[in-house]
């Protein structure tokens, strides 16, 4: 599968899921994106349209730490 087809397929899945899943103030939505080198996570309140919390392996708190084996270490 070519890169363009992969990106298009991912965006199609994202659109399909985001039409069904909504985060609220009581139960916010967790969004996770994994790239080849990093992982990104966001906690989102769709009612207000804002990100409540975000974290990634590129953040200052995790940069330079020994995260164990593999590209994501002991994050899971």
Image (cartoon, rainbow, N blue to C red):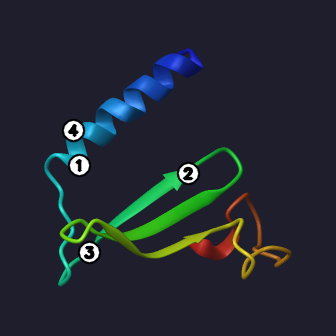
Q: Which residue is mark 2?
A: 34
Viewer-side label of 2, 1? 1
Is residue 1 found left or right of 72 in the rendered image?
A: left
Measured in 3D between alpha carbons, the distance from the residue under mark 1 to the one under mark 3, in whole angstroms, is 13 Å
Q: Mark 2 or mark 4, which has the lower sequence index?
A: 4
Name the residue located 34 percent from the left edge and 69 percent from the top edge: 50
Name the residue located 77 percent from the left edge and 72 percent from the top edge: 68
Asked if disc 2 and disc 1 are in contact, CB closer than 8 Å, the reply is: no
Is residue 73 found left or right of 64 in the rendered image?
A: left
Measured in 3D between alpha carbons, the distance from the residue under mark 4 to the one under mark 3, in whole angstroms, is 18 Å
Q: Mark 2 or mark 3, which has the lower sequence index?
A: 3
On screen, 36 above or below 65?
above
Name the residue located 79 percent from the left edge and 73 percent from the top edge: 63
Residue 18 badge: 1
Asked if disc 4 and disc 1 are in contact, CB closer than 8 Å, the reply is: yes
Indicate the quadrant containing the C terminus: top left, top right, bottom left or bottom right.
bottom right
Q: Residue 39 location, x and y as percent?
A: 60, 59
Q: Mark 4 or mark 3, which has the lower sequence index?
A: 4
Q: Residues within 10 Å of mark 2 (few under 14, many from 20)?
A: few
Asked if disc 4 and disc 3 are in contact, CB closer than 8 Å, the reply is: no
Q: Which residue is mark 4?
A: 16
Name the residue located 53 percent from the left edge and 18 percent from the top edge: 4
Q: Which residue is mark 3?
A: 28
């Amino acid at each position: 599968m070519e890169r363009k087809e992969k990106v298009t397929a991912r965006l199609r899945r994202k659109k399909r899921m985001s039409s069904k899943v909504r985060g609220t103030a009581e139960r916010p939505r967790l969004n996770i994106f994994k790239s080849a080198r990093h992982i990104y996570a966001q906690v989102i309140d769709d009612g207000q349209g804002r990100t409540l919390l975000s974290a990634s392996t590129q953040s200052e708190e995790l940069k330079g730490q020994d995260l164990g084996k593999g590209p994501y270490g002991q994050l899971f």
